[in-house]
Amino acid sequence: MKKTEIMKKVSTTFGKVGFQMKKHSPEILIVAGVIGTVASAVMACKATTKVGEIVEKTKDDLDEIHKAAEAGVTNAGETYNEDDSKKDLAIVYARTGFEFVKLYAPSVIMGTLSLTSIIASDNILRKRNAALAAAYATVDKGFKDYRGRVIERFGEGVDRELKNGVKAKKVDAIETDPETGKEKKVKKQKLVANPSDISGYARFFEQYTTDEDGTTILNRNWESNNDYNLMFLKAQEKFANDLLIAKKRVFLNEVYEALGFPRTKAGQIVGWVYDEENPIGDNYIDFGLHEDNPVYSDTEDNSAILLDFNVDGNIWDLM
């Protein structure tokens, strides 16, 4: 029984180690490749220090052959003709070549294995990225199809509410009485969304934002007057569409940066593609502003404006 348990633990341990090795194989291969490349360079430098000996011996042998050919006899007094000289020269050159190959072969083999390791690492990453892209495309298509069915049955308003958890809420607002000019507090209905419920690419345009590491960043484009903010956002939306038509593709990170948001990992991949003849997506950039009835953050001051971007998906595969 104990033997069985030990074998089971050993098998489980080897299985876990094997999985971790496979999981981290690109990093292992790239590190091995880099170390091997450095080692190859060191070995080549070390081998170069012995080149002088080979060259010197070859020079001495060649000088001896040339002298014997000129004299017609060897040092031992044997007859030495032109054919003997050619044969000996061929032997010396072949031997010298073999010596050089033997000298540099270890460093060349090490360098070749190192490059092979780096290339293998790249191939593994390429296959994994292709698999991730395929998985994302499947999920993205399923989500878009689902949204399409929601819009078809219930309309865009319901889709918008469900996607970002939008709801109507009565909030306090200050209005100026047109007759008396006095300010008064009133209750107004406002569309709001909880920051934790919004979609992955959506962002709240507000004074402070956070990056993926949780660092708080000041958005210098934000103003305390939301009328100015809406004007700025509409202007940026138009600029983004002009950029899309000019460049034929725009990444989400480019729009994020223009608005004062930090870049994201997903923003390096998703975005929009413009194709006038065969549109891939909407063929335009929409911030999801709904200027006539914008959605605000369901927080204490309700001032942050929700932006929900209509990205086409992974545009690396669409271009």
Image (cartoon, rainbow, N blue to C red):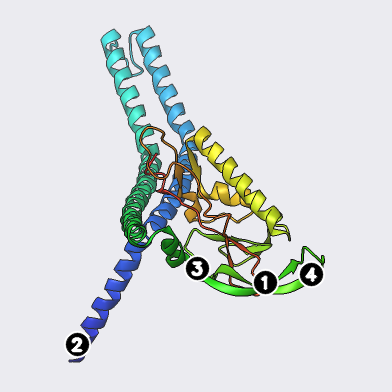
Residue 294 x/y as whole percent: 57, 60
Classify 10 Å Cα crowding around label 1: few (below 14), some (14-19), many (20 and above): few
Question: Which marked residue is nearer to the observer: mark 1 or mark 2?
Answer: 1
Classify 10 Å Cα crowding around label 2: few (below 14), some (14-19), many (20 and above): few
Could you tell me if residue 233 is visible in this image? Answer: yes
Q: Which callout, 1 or 3, points at the residue further toward the start of the chain?
A: 3
Q: Which mark is residue 3?
A: 2
Question: Which marked residue is nearer to the observer: mark 4 or mark 3?
Answer: 4
Residue 196 x/y as whole percent: 52, 71
The residue most toward the bottom is: 1
At a point 30% along the width and 19% down the height, the residue shown is 90
At a point 22% along the width and 82% down the height, the residue shown is 8
Please tell me whether mark 4 sits on a helix, a strand or a loop: strand
Write down the residue under mark 4.
Answer: 183
- Amino acid type, label 1: Asp
Mark 3 and mark 2: Cα distance apart in space: 61 Å
Mark 1 and mark 4: Cα distance apart in space: 18 Å
Tell which of 206 and 46 is nearer to you: 206
Q: Which callout, 4 or 3, points at the residue further toward the start of the chain?
A: 3
Q: Eyeballing the image, is 101 above or below 58? A: below
The residue most toward the front is: 179
Write down the residue under mark 3.
Answer: 166
Q: Which mark is residue 301?
A: 1
Classify 10 Å Cα crowding around label 3: few (below 14), some (14-19), many (20 and above): many
